[in-house]
Amino acid sequence: MIVRAAGGSVVVHEVEDFDRFRVETGLAPAVLDGELRARDAGYVIDDDSAAIAPSFIALHAGPRTKDAAWGAHMRAMVEHARRNGWFTDDGALVAHIVVGT
């Protein structure tokens, strides 16, 4: 799953791919942070990581899938992130930021 952020938009792509979770952007960290926060999508942790709200993903990706088990897959992804320390204290998933897209 890819959260793609550009000036004025934050969109979830590859909504049925639960193996690769990242943020792709061409924005500077401070601008990316503003875009994520403005949409209740999350926030930038540091130059390499962002926190993405599972509720944002569910709202913007879930309805676009044809997979009846999408919700179960999403819950499994969240639990996997929690077990591996890729989860923030405030309940967000930690995603690697890929710059230059």
Image (cartoon, grey):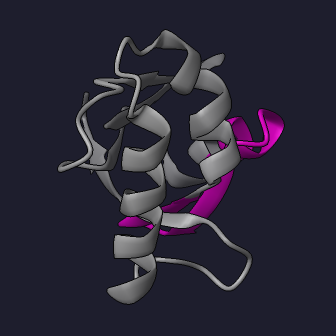
Q: Which residues are magenta?
A: 33-51
Q: Is residue 25 left or right of residue 64?
A: left
Looking at this view, name the residue that lies furthest to the left.
19
Which is more toward the observer, 77 or 68?
Answer: 68
Position of the N terminus by quadrant? top left
Q: Which residue shows up at 48% across the image and 56% down it?
A: 75
Q: Quadrant of residue 36?
A: top right
Count of marks overlaid on the render: 0
Q: Is residue 59 left or right of residue 52?
A: right
Q: Position of residue 60 (x, y in %)?
A: 61, 23
Q: Can the viewer see residue 85?
A: no
Relative to residue 6, is residue 3 depicted above or below? below
Q: Which residue shows up at 58% across the image and 43% down it?
A: 32
Residue 50 is inside the magenta segment: yes
Q: Position of residue 49 (x, y in %)?
A: 42, 66
Q: Position of residue 88 (x, y in %)?
A: 59, 79
Q: Position of residue 96 (x, y in %)?
A: 32, 60
Q: Which residue shows up at 28% across the image and 24% down it?
A: 14
Q: Can the viewer see residue 37?
A: yes
Which is more toward the observer, 47 or 58?
Answer: 58
Position of the C terminus by quadrant? top left
Which is more toward the observer, 62 or 95?
Answer: 62
Q: Which residue shows up at 81% across the image and 36% down it?
A: 38
Residue 31 is inside the magenta segment: no
Which is more toward the observer, 9 or 14?
Answer: 14
